Each structure stands twice: as structure tokens, then as C-alpha cells.
Image (cartoon, helix red, strand yellow):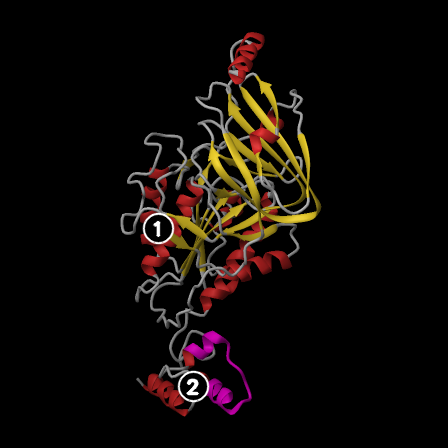
Amino acid sequence: MFKLFLILISIISVGLSQVAPSYQPYSLIKSEFELPITQLAIDNEINLDFTETALMTIAPDGFIYRLSLSFNNITSGHLEITNWQVPDGSMLFIFNDEKSYTGPYLSNNEKEFTSGRFISNKLTLEYFEPIHAIFAGRFNIKGILPDFVISSQDTQIHNVKVNLTRERPKIMVTGYWPPTNEMVRHFSQNSDLNPEGWQGENWENLGYDVVSFFPEFDPANCNNCGQGYGNLEVDYQDFSGDFWPIVQSVKPVAIITFSRGYNDHSWELENRVVNRTNWVQDYTAPLLPTPNPPDDSVPNYHVRYTSLPVDAIISEIERAGLGLDAYLDNTNAGMFLSEFAGYHGTWYKEDHDENPDFPCFAGGHIHVGAQIDWATAKQAAEISIRTLIEYVDQFMVIPGDCNSDGAVNILDVVALANVILGTAEFTPSQIIAADLDGNDVLNILDIIAIVNLILT
């Protein structure tokens, strides 16, 4: 009754309600409203009912609840949300500072979930509920979960030897909302998208072509970008319809799908993507995937895991000193086109990781913080791709090519002899190339096998 009374007062005093802009915190888009906040100092444990604790403000189009949690020291981790029961149109944002936030967390999230990562000594939680919601939302902040261990995937490295009889192997990357489409634009082979010319041919002389695919937006630096146009639009049917013909043509040895993530400076590698049915609706009917779930080869809510070299990528991003927060996320990957794209990449990889003709050795998704400028995002994308190539290199070996020069000849015999005599060392991929009998020992038998290869 009390909430109904507040609704009537709001309607009478303001007139026709306005519609809150989608997916943006009220405090940033409606600066004319003074939004009070409850301040709580937190020592170690949290267990509270959010709507009972936070201060509420009545706005023309809804109710805004705000709560500040202060810590003694800089804390990193994830908020554990339970009893998530909120009506359609509700949105929760969690701020690290005045402008950087994770979210929105929407009504179709699971009943219990974990927030995106934060690093702060003070969090601000802002929850918006539409004024005409059919019921009053509520949820609990149960506690803080620590950062996840970086190396969480149990990916086995298969020592696959590939005869490179086809054209140069390709790394495929995809973009989404900016900055991700802009940071991979120079790898596009489409002259309309990349008038300065394709820069991915034998990129950095590493032996791989890098190709990119992404939609376009008007304006290019959009915030609320919508569906876009071109390849891989932010639409379930369009993305699938474009993705499968692209990978069948490219036959990539590795895939990174990129998309814009939280409103911060994060470089968030997703550990898990789900063959889910509870997707967030897109912009054009049908609003959900068809079929739903998209992958009928596995059960509903089957999880596919990243096979990107996450430890190495995170380490290299940190070492570059770009001011980015690189980490592995083991929680919800977004439930929208980001996770949908990531699922397609890992799906293709797992279907082709043992393909003898056109194998794919790695696939995974990276969320890119919306506050990262285009130049920095481009640097970080290139670091990630370069690190991925180093990882894939161990699979891309020609049997007998001990010195990795792309040919099998007497120089490989000399290189192997030096290693056997102890005057030189091989890299892991060179060891795979040299161990022709597969017994994990390099000896005279391998030299004989290479000589036979040369003679035949």
C-alpha cells in the first residue's frame, strides 16, 4: 500500500511518466535528480537485504535505491547476489568509482549469481525499478567472493603435427560495439571497412594471416549502439547466419571473439559460455535465438570453456603497462550477443580441434571495457593476438622441420644432432617436430627418420 501511495503521488506531481533510457545508470543520465544514499562501513562479512537497507528516491519513471559499501582497504572480488527477485525493466549497477561500473544486472538473471569483478575501497550499488512494475523487487547481498584463480581451465595440450600443405594459417578475430570493432579494423580484408588496406597478411612475419569481421555503427563512437549493420550484427539470427559461412571459408586455427563489456578499463577473459535459453532480447524479431538454445548437439545449459592461453594473455597485458585490468571471469558471460558470439567461437573450436585437415586449436571470448580508448584497445588486442599465436605455434609444426624454417632438409639433421650432443636446445614445438617416432626421446632414430623424409 505504501508503494502504491508513492506511485500516485509521483504521477500527480509529475504528470506523464518518462521512459528510463535502457542500460544506463540513472545517476549518470539524470543528473538533475538528487539521489541520497545509505553509507555502510564493511569489515569482513556482508549479509543484507538490499531494498531494506538502501535509500530510495522517487523519480518520474521509477524508484532508485542506492547503497554505498566502504572497505578498510582496496578490495577486489565479486559480490554474491542471492534471492534475486526483480520485475521486468529493473536494473542493478555496481560502481567502482563515479563513472566505472559493472552491469546492468536484469530481471532474467539467475536467482543467484555473482557480479562482475570490482577493485575499490568503496562500492556504490544503484538499483532502478520501473514505477509501474507489477511487483516490488528485492534481493540480498550475501557476501564477497575473492578473485578467481587465473588458470582455471583444464585444457590438455595435444601434440598435434600439422602438415602445412594449405595456404598460410589464419587467426580470426571478431568485433562488436566500439571499441572492439575499431581495434580490429586494420585486420579486415574488406576495403570498404578498411580503406587503408589489410595489415594482417603474414602479420609481423609470424607466419599467420589475421582476419577480422565486425558490424558498423553510426556514429562510430556510439554509446547506445543498437544492432548496427553489416557482418555479425548485434542480432542472434544475423550473427549465426554470418558466422558459419565465414568460418567455413576462413578455416581459422584460432578464434578470439571480442565485445564491449563493462563501463570500465577491464580486459575480461571469459572462462565459460553457456548453451542457455534465458538470453537477453535483441533488437529485431525474433528477439531470441532460433533455435533456442542455439546448439542442439549438447544439452540445455551445457558449458563450453575457453581454450585461449589466459595466463599468458593476462600476464602480457599487465606487463605492457596500458592501465587495463586484465583478469579471468568465471561467472556469467553476459547472456546477450557477447556470450552468444563467445559460444560460437568455442563451439567451432571444439568441433574442429582434431580435424586432420583444418584443425582449430583455440577459441574464446574477451570483454573489452567501454572506457578504453581505441588506440589502447588496439594495442591490447594485438598483444592478445600475438600471445595467442605463440600458443598456437606449438601445434603448427611440420614433422622433421627441426629448425622451424618451413622445410625439411639437411639443416634439420644438423640442428637435431646438435641437440642430441647437448650443444643446443629446442623449443617445445621443435621437440614435437623432431620426435618423429613419438617416444618423447630425441636420438639417432629420429635423425634416421628425418634422413628418410629428405630422401623420399
Residue at x 44% of width, y 83% of height: 412
Q: Residue furthest right?
A: 72
Residue at the image point whose x is 35% and y is 54% from the top: 348
Vertically, is 132 above or below 320? above
User: x and y percent of residue 91 in the render?
Assistant: 51, 31
* Magenta run includes residue 100: no
- Residue closer to the observer: 115 or 71: 71
Task: Quarter of the image for the C terminus: give it.
Answer: bottom left
Residue 237 horizontal/vertical position (percent): 33, 38
The mark closer to the camera, 1 or 2, is 1
Number of on-image labels: 2
Q: Could you say which is closer to the camera, residue 167 or residue 325?
A: 325
Residue 151: x, y in percent? 51, 61
Q: Is residue 276 left or right of residue 206?
A: left
- In space, the residues marked 1 and 2 are separated at their CA atoms by 40 Å
Amino acid type, mark 2: Val
Whether residues under marks 1 and 2 lie with C-beta atoms below 8 angstroms apart, the answer is no
The magenta segment is: 414-432
Packing grade of label 2 (10 A; few <14, some 14-19, many >=20) is: some
Using the image, tell me which numbered label, if any, was put on residue 441.
2
Q: Secondary structure at mark 1?
A: loop
User: Residue at image x 33%, y 53%?
Assistant: 249
| Vertical comparison of 284 with 212: above or below | above
User: In the rendered image, is residue 428 in sight?
Assistant: yes
Residue in the picture at 48% in, 43% down? 113
Local secondary structure at mark 2 = loop
Label 1 crowd bin: few (<14), some (14–19), many (20+), radius 10 Å? some
| Mark number, residue 413 | none
Check disc 1 and give the amino acid type: His
Counting residues from the N terminus, which is met first, the one under dot 1 or under dot 2? 1
Is residue 424 shown in magenta?
yes
